[in-house]
Amino acid sequence: SGCPSSGKTIMVSKREVRIEGHRRKFLAVVDSTPECEKAIHYAARRVAAIDADLVLIFVIVPQDFGHWLGVEDVMRSEGRAAADAALAKGKAWCMEFGGITPQTVVREGVPSKCIEDLIEEDHDIALMVLAAGEHKDGPGPLVSAIAGSSAAFSIPVTVVPATLTDQDIDDLV
């Protein structure tokens, strides 16, 4: 489903994790950044430790090819293949780090908007996990967006520092 940028403030909907039949979920973003594995490592270990669930989201950022419909179809197909491959890798990390099988979601659109939409739709998602990058130019695109006022989310966000080793993460959870 598409997630165009609305520019509107998202209302905070009530989380349902304490209602019978619901389970607390953490959300982690799967992308091509090197810090992605660190975020999934922390999230998988944490949800395994507290008996919660994990949702992995991959957002395909659409390319505008206008009247080049054939090119757009090829790019969309390649985007879906990239999403499937990245989510397969994310699922393998979840099994390796936490012994868990996550729920996976693929959306197409502006990443921060697609994430907002998923949080609004799934009232069991109670926390998002991101990892800061080790880049000279900043902590990574999503962490930078959250630090600015343009992409605040309606749930808490845990940011895993880039300096943590795998052993550090294991020790924390």
Image: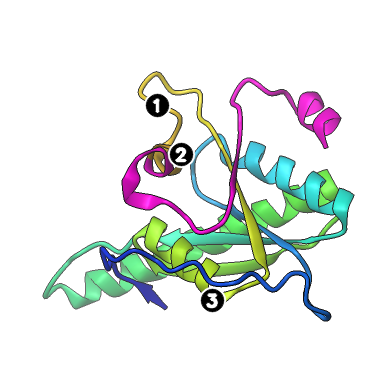
Give the residue number, with chain letter if any, for mark 2. Answer: 143
Q: Which mark sits nearer the N-terminus, 3 or 1?
A: 3
- Residue behind mark 3: 121
Quarter where residue 161 is shown:
top right
Q: Residues within 10 Å of mark 3 (few under 14, many from 20)?
A: few
Quarter of the figure that contains the N terminus: bottom left
Residue range highlighted in magenta: 145-173
Where disc 1 sits, the SS reads: loop
User: Which image quarter is the C terminus in?
Assistant: top right
For mark 2, give the secondary structure.
Answer: helix
Between 86 and 46, the one nearer to me in the picture: 46
Above or below, 167 against 120 in this view is: above
Q: Which residue is mark 1?
A: 138
Q: Are marks 1 and 2 in contact (CB under 8 Å)?
A: yes
Amino acid type, label 2: Val
In the image, is 68 to the left or to the right of 151?
A: left
11 w.r.t. 170: above or below = below
Q: Is residue 49 depicted above or below 34 in this figure? A: below
